[in-house]
Image: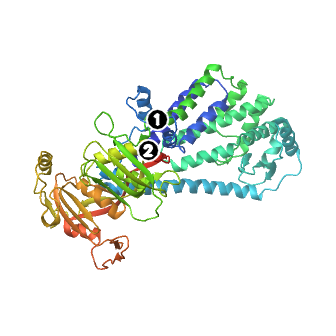
Amino acid sequence: MIAAIANHLWQSTLVGAVVALLTLALRDNRAQVRYWLWLAASVKFLAPFAVLVAVGRRLEWRSATVETQPAMTLFMDAVAQPFAQAPLRAVAASSTRSVSTDGAILPLVLLAIWGAGCVLMLLTWWVRWRRLAAVVSAAPAMQQGRELAALRRLEAITGIMTPVTMVASTSTSAVEPGVFGIQNPVLLWPTTISDRLTDAQIDAILAHELAHLRRRDNLAAAVHMTVQSVFWFHPLTWWIGARLVEERERACDEEVLRLGSEPQAYAESLLKTCEVCIEMHPACAAGVTGADLKKRIAGIMSSHAGDALHPWKKVLIATAALTAVAGPLAVGAMNAPALHAQTSIAAPGAPMKFEVASVKPNKSGEMGVRMGIQPGGRFIATNVTLRQLVREAYHLQNFQLTGGPSWFNVDHFDITAKADIDIPDPFTGSSGPDPLSLLLRSLLQERFKLVVHIEPREMPIYALLFARSDKRFGPQLRKAAVDCAAETAKRGAGTPPLDRPSGRPTCGISMGPGMLSAGGASFAQLTNVLSPAVGRIIVDKTALAGAFDIDLRWTPDQPVQKRDDAPAAAVDPNGSSIFTALQEQLGLKLESQRGPVDVLVVDRAEQPTEN
């Protein structure tokens, strides 16, 4: 989460720097152009590039495999994820990424500080807004007068079809003229300035306020007010806010001069308004005296309304906008391609494939599912859904798989396949794809046209930690008595399998309802096989290497079904839960945290043809 926020802030800062360079190149052009650029920089804070990257991942033209990465793609990826951690594996349960338990309090402290600042900002805006709303509510609507007549005349000139409500304020606070409101704006006119202004000066001020109204400046100001409230800690948001007000007022000044107001009369109207009206509107209500008044008057007196954009400047702006949108899409489409089911992280070469495979629909309506390997490289699956096959091929828990067509978890199939080699019984809990997984992925791609991709998502996880401060083992956790790597090599050379004393495999993992026995297993393998029992990914944070013999017994939360036609075995209400058993028997504990979990997203799958 912290890395994602850091990425977003970095990307928004980069966009702000690019916009600053663009506005510098456009300093002699119309203020309206610079205003829209600054507004885009503000909105970027509310639109993470990660959204576009995610869209890019789902584009149909992306490549299934990527052997090389162009330098441009690497650059865009560095911009998009400069604080990204190492890529997660397809099965997040085997991830060894860790977060210090002692540092878990820091995010909470930062969240509290951010929340307090955000609430304070919103409360400040709300108080100022309510104060002005009270002034507007107390002001009666104007029915006649030279100000109202001038307003109606300017509305006709500027093409405003719906008459604007004009209210006359007699408030002693001397609020300046301005447009208040977003959906139904009202033009607030302080009566204290009417006698000090000539008709030409009144026309200039009203033309300025109508420019605010046509541009919907109050709505844009409210958007940036939201940005400042959420990202109050980032200095760039305050600097962008000042630039927005500056260019907004200059754009309105240029519009007033374009409508024919005399520069002298307009400048004098601003000065007289400042003499009388000492209270300005909040940022979300557009007034007339905002920004640096000295610079504005200098610009008004020069009668320079801004040059038109040269073609090369238009190309520059279009290129920057296209890069901001197309860049993240390209990162998602090119640098995070979809993984076809046969893709593996094995050594280069031809993918592992079944020699022959039969896939047929199963319409028996039975509930039982059988899946396993037989001598001679045979794989048999009966009454399985495509969802079950994908989970088996990628070693996923149910919540790690999403997407797929409507029949993905409904239609059942019988599969008989044969490989040209004996399929080894995978070491339960081993890391990386085993031969059976690679064969299944190839089958899924060829027969079901399966296309998937991986998305890391923030989810609840369990951290595996030592239960005791002295890191002592429990009675059922011991250093492995056998070097399983050496014994596995011997068995491959023809040595008979080792005996299984007390029902525990000497090398391997055996797991059933409420029990786990392992010989020569690592903690990473332990977390893999325990994750389904607790319904979350377990991440090993003990930092303890080596192999262990493990015997663990607990009482399952749900009744255990003995066989398809037998009633479920009762659960002992006084038995130890898996959490208690871990502490008492292994000297370990599970601590609830949040962390990144890889989710496999099914982009496409097709019904297989029978054979």
The amino acid type, in three-letter code, at marker 1 is: Val
Q: How far from the left and from the top, in percent, is residue 106?
A: 36, 54
- Horizontal and vertical percent for residue 5? 44, 46
Left or right relative to 405: residue 455: left
- In the displayed structure image, the side of residue 500 where residue 55 appears, left or right: right
The answer to whether one can see residue 108 in this image is no
The crowd level at tag 2 (other Cα within 10 Å; few <14, some 14-19, many 20+) is some
On screen, 291 above or below 318?
A: below
Q: Amino acid at mark 2?
A: Arg
* Mark 2 element type: helix
Residue 559 bears which disc, if any?
A: none
Residue 419 coordinates in the image, percent (x, y): 30, 44
Residue position marked by numbered label 2 in the rendering: 447
Closer to us: 198 or 184: 184
Nearest to the observer: residue 277 or residue 470: 470
Could you tell me if residue 361 is visible in this image? yes
Residue tagged by mark 1? 331
In this rendering, position of residue 608 left or right of residue 129: left
Q: Dot 1: few (<14), some (14–19), or many (≥20) neighbours within 10 Å?
A: many
Please tell me whether residue 289 is drawn above or below residue 411 in the rendered image: above
Picture residue at 80% right of the left edge, 52% below the top: 167
Task: Residue 223 in the image: state x and y as whole percent.
Answer: 61, 46
